[in-house]
Amino acid sequence: MASFISRTVCCPSRPRLSRLLMINQTGRNINDVRFSSSQSSAGGSDGNKQDGGESKQAGSWLNNIFAPARIHTGNRPHSRLLSASEFIYEMHHHDAKPEFADDYIGKYEKYSNELIAKTNGKAELVGSFRVEVGSHHDDFIHIWRYHDGYKQVSDIHKQIKTDDQLVKLNKDLAKDLVKRESQFMMSFSFWDHPKPQKLNSFYEMRSYVLKPGTMIDWANGWSKGIKHRDNAVAGFFSQIGQLYTVHHIWRYEDLQARKDVRENAWRRPGWDECVAITVPNIVYLHSRWMSPNSFSPIS
């Protein structure tokens, strides 16, 4: 029998709210337990099996209730269950040398314009941000989108390595960097794809590393939880790079607005349940407060 933890989820913003959720080791709400046709009661109608049958039947019944919920994914890849498009996103994380940070961002704008032109817009810059709080002040996050799957990604990456002008610009960028990392991602089907917007806002990117095997549970919880937030910009899950990683990007007018929005979410019925179900799946969480660069389509 799976062990259960009784957790009381309380919210200071909602007085008198004290919801008791029974959550098993996988972090699932007991109300979400599903039964399959094969999970029938033990014992039968044969009179010779009556002796001890009741105890076996009761044991089987209890096992059915307290067994972890099963999500039947069939034989489809999880990425197909989680995303509804062929879009591939690439996130670049660049750590610039402090003394060259301003020069770097000017060079990156030139590089991004050249890449977009060379690929006829097939490489699409979604957003470009400077990290204000949460890591080095000279960290930059750039997100690119490719519309036609990994074949297009491979073609564009080959072009980046062979086009003389792009190679030159890339080498010039590298002089201003301490390190750079990248990650391929897809967008959750229950989030809208990020769209260009000029709102003079700030953005928070919350990055989660999840326990292996819990991505479907995470998506199930957030497909409901997203309804309680009005400031969602993007939601991604990793494909290559740090695996089992999720990135949520939210828009805020300022830090006070962030505080107000997050507190108001707790006043909406159902948000506490989303948190209670998904939090046990988190191994690591990192938050970055970011401002858009001048050439970012999202600003």
Image: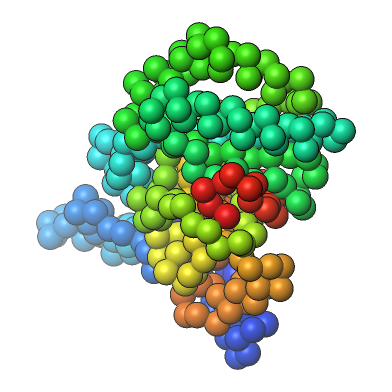
Which of the 4 image quarters holds residue 177? top right
Residue with the most extreme bottom position: 16
Q: Please name whichever residue, 125 or 111, is drawn nearer the observer in this view of the structure.
A: 111
- Whether residue 25 is visible here, answered yes or no, is no
Residue with the most extreme left position: 46
Which of the 4 image quarters holds residue 275? bottom right
Q: Residue at x 61, y 30 (%)?
A: 110
Which colour assignment does the render follow? Answer: rainbow
User: Going by the image, does 1 lie left or right of 109?
Assistant: left
Which of the 4 image quarters holds residue 75? top left
Q: Residue at x 31, y 41 (%)?
A: 85
Q: Residue at x 31, y 59 (%)?
A: 34
Q: Residue at x 51, y 66 (%)?
A: 231
User: Going by the image, does 194 lie left or right of 11?
Assistant: left
Picture mark count: 0
Locate the C terminus by quadrant: bottom right
Q: Position of residue 92 (x, y in %)?
A: 60, 33
Q: Position of residue 165 (x, y in %)?
A: 56, 15
Q: Is residue 226 above or below residue 114?
A: below
User: Going by the image, does 186 lie left or right of 105?
Assistant: left
Q: Position of residue 226 (x, y in %)?
A: 45, 64
Q: Please name whichever residue, 104 or 233, is drawn nearer the observer in this view of the structure.
A: 104
Q: Is residue 174 above or below residue 26?
A: above
Q: Is residue 255 above or below residue 153?
A: below
- Whether residue 20 is visible here, answered yes or no, is yes
Residue with the most extreme right position: 99
Q: Position of residue 184 (x, y in %)?
A: 49, 31
